[in-house]
Image (tube, coloured by chain):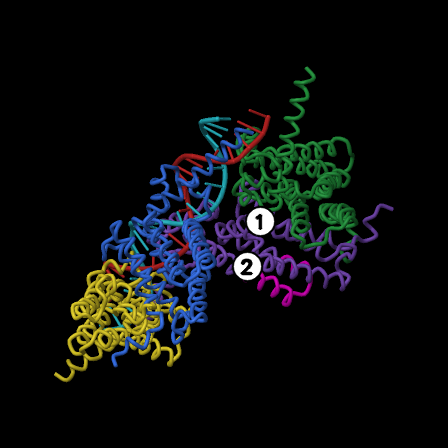
Chain colours: A blue, B yellow, C green, D purple, E red, F cyan
DNA sequence: CATGAATGAGACTTCATTCAT
DNA sequence: TATGAATGAAGTCTCATTCAT
């Protein structure tokens, strides 16, 4: 009994070990240039063991993506249901994404570079999941529009694309060191994204217009 | 003389013919899945002729990208120098990108999907060129900040990423039919992007804040 | 003592259980497509246990073949020694093969498809054993020729090949459902094979030739 | 023009050259143990060229089989239509198969060993074609039965299996040197097969039965 | 006896690029 | 210029067998 439990545990560990190695290798070389033998070597296991735990190289990336993306979807939906104003909701969504990157930049690099931005390969495979994030953001915007808190001349789907695109581009900038990414940047980024995008989505008051 | 000219012309035609075929094939199948034989077939020329005009498959994409991207850089810089307020400048930049897509969606698809979003492959190769666009946008923002027209708590580089990211995501949405792309969408998109992003970058007046 | 016996018995059971599973899997998927894991699963035992009882996947098939083939050889030889005319002898041989199929079609399918007809793999390994069957049949024919009961212008080896080939082809037809295989077919097949082949081997009388 | 023709000719030659090499390699090592590199080496061409002419290793065997088997089918059907008695028809069919072996034993070895006898792999793929041969033979038998030339207590399908099985077994015996295969054997074999099998299929006259 | 994780060699296929004509 | 045959390196996946527990 104990033996079986231990064995299962060890097996799960090995599986995780391989998956973590895959993250590092995919982040370093890109999915396409990553050979299965690189992953095995990085994980310190035999070639064949990778195929003992995974059906294919693709499956590893799919699993990495889905595992993380579902957390993101949960986070957005939870923000939507538990917070009470659109700024806070969108701020929480942006914050989750940014924290994900801060916490595990390699994994987020893989997810963004190899999946969400790889529209011709894995992006297509996961389009439905990715779209769910757009939809969840669009719902927040639409609710805010109905409540008179956001301008209504922008469609909520359109706004969701801008919002998500801005964040993803920011992460991409960090990933490829186009823009600096220090600890203080992460925090200010959260605030600024919300400021900037939500600011643009809120109705302008009459006073703004020069008389 | 005339013969030589004709010959050159015909040669240039063939070259162009192959390049145009490459656009269609890359757009349809993606760069990676596109075989050189597919391009030759699409162009209606012999396999080997592709290698007569181009050194490699990569070179074709590089050329397609650089050709178009330099127009984009020119357009942004010209907008910056010829227009006099940041909304107009950014509007012209966004407008150029959107019009490029409207005019030749396949080419823009290739450029975005295979280069600017393909950070692990061609995006890396062309990072310097891509960065020039960010910089040109950032310059517009920085100038506006100095002139007091844009808020200064957002770094201009950061703002440029948001702005560019929002536009690129919008195009990506059109490309993969996540958001609708009809003629009227293009026009309203131009206005709305500027409204939304510039609106967020402009300073909020006192009147906005509830008393 | 009893314990040891029981243990041996249980062990023998497991071994048999695996061997029987192998028959089913080989019959269903073919030897080559059968994975050791398939056999273990079919037998309901752990993967590794297969290798506790057998040295290799090959060994299982070898054992299945030899076990059954030796019964066949015994049957032919016994028929030869205990019966007194060639028709009866050959009829008994054919009958044994047909009954073997009727009794355990999966095993006979494996033996025929994977061994006797698989001349490039296991057929080669067991060529000597297979040849013994040909020889035993040829001996029956040769004896009949010496006794004047069979025509002598056909070599006994040649006749043996025809006889055996006809039977094996018939089973193959049943196996792959090229010809029907119902209970009544088996019985009539026995009679007809002997009729047809022995009929062809018996000397023609003068009366047959048109005067 | 001439150039194109020459090139096509050379290309066809290379294709044939590879196919012929495949016959030798398949005959020597068996399909399964034959590596594509072995075939390329035997043909004296580069590895990749094999895939320039053929889609897969399987395709080569399929082509070899179908090419030859269609000749066999034609031969049987022609014999049926052009000859006027069942002995002659079946004799021509058997003769064609035997001559095929005499003329190109390696090809016939491949066809028999890797296809018609390989019921679990290629035999399945080509079952329909193989069955056509059985059917063509059965038709000859059935016609003879209707004409009163063959006994009617044997179904024509059954008889076809015996006839074909006997021949195939004979070739198999030659292939694996179980029975001798010299020039004189081929000729006598033709006569004897017909004698033996047709003899068994013809009605026995009263005189035969001992009074 | 029993388990199933771990090993690693092996082969097919793809396709960018080169080359002879 | 134009053709398309020829080259060969590279990498995924399979699975029999071994081994530690």
Q: Position of residue D157 (x, y in %)?
A: 70, 57
Residue D60 visible here: yes
The one of D165 and B106 positioned closer to us in this rendering: B106
Residue A85's image quarter?
Answer: bottom left
The image shows residue B128, relative to residue B11, as above or below, that is above
Q: In this rendering, would F19 be left or right of B103?
A: right
Give the letter of the chain under mark 1. Answer: D
Name the residue tied to disc 1.
D120
Residue at (22, 75) in percent of width and height: B89
Q: Position of residue D83 (x, y in %)?
A: 65, 65
Residue B151's image quarter?
Answer: bottom left
Residue D1 visible here: no
Name the residue tied to disc 2.
D69
The residue range painted magenta reads D70-91
Give the letter of the chain under mark 2. Answer: D
The one of A66 and C187 positioned closer to us in this rendering: A66
Q: Position of residue C7 (x, y in %)?
A: 65, 22
The local secondary structure at tag 1 comes to loop
The one of C8 and C175 positioned closer to us in this rendering: C8
Q: Is-magenta flag for residue B153? A: no
Q: Where is residue C197 in the image (x, y as percent from the top left)?
A: 71, 47
The local secondary structure at tag 2 comes to helix
Residue at (43, 66) in percent of width and height: A138
Q: Is-magenta flag for residue D84? A: yes
Q: Which residue lies furthest to the front in this view?
A: B211
């Amino acid at each position: 009994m104990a033996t079986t439990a231990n064995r299962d545990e060890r097996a799960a560990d090995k599986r995780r070990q391989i998956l973590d190695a895959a993250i590092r290798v995919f982040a370093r070389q890109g999915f396409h240039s990553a050979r299965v033998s690189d992953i095995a070597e990085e994980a310190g296991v035999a070639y064949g063991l990778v195929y003992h735990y995974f059906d294919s190289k693709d499956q590893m990336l799919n699993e990495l993506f889905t595992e993380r993306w579902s957390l993101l979807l949960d986070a957005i939906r939870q923000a939507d249901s538990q917070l009470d104003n659109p700024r806070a909701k969108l701020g929480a969504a942006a914050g989750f994404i940014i924290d994900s990157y801060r916490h595990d930049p390699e994994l987020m690099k893989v997810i963004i570079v190899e999946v969400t931005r790889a529209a011709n390969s894995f992006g297509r495979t996961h389009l439905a999941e990715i779209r769910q994030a757009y939809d969840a953001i669009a719902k927040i915007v639409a609710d805010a529009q109905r409540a008179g808190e956001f301008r209504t001349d922008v469609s909520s789907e359109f706004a969701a694309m801008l919002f998500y695109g801005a964040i993803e581009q920011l992460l991409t900038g960090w990933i490829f060191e186009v823009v600096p990414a220090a600890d203080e940047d992460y925090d200010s980024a959260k605030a600024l994204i919300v400021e900037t995008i939500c600011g643009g989505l809120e109705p302008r008051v009459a006073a703004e217009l020069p008389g």
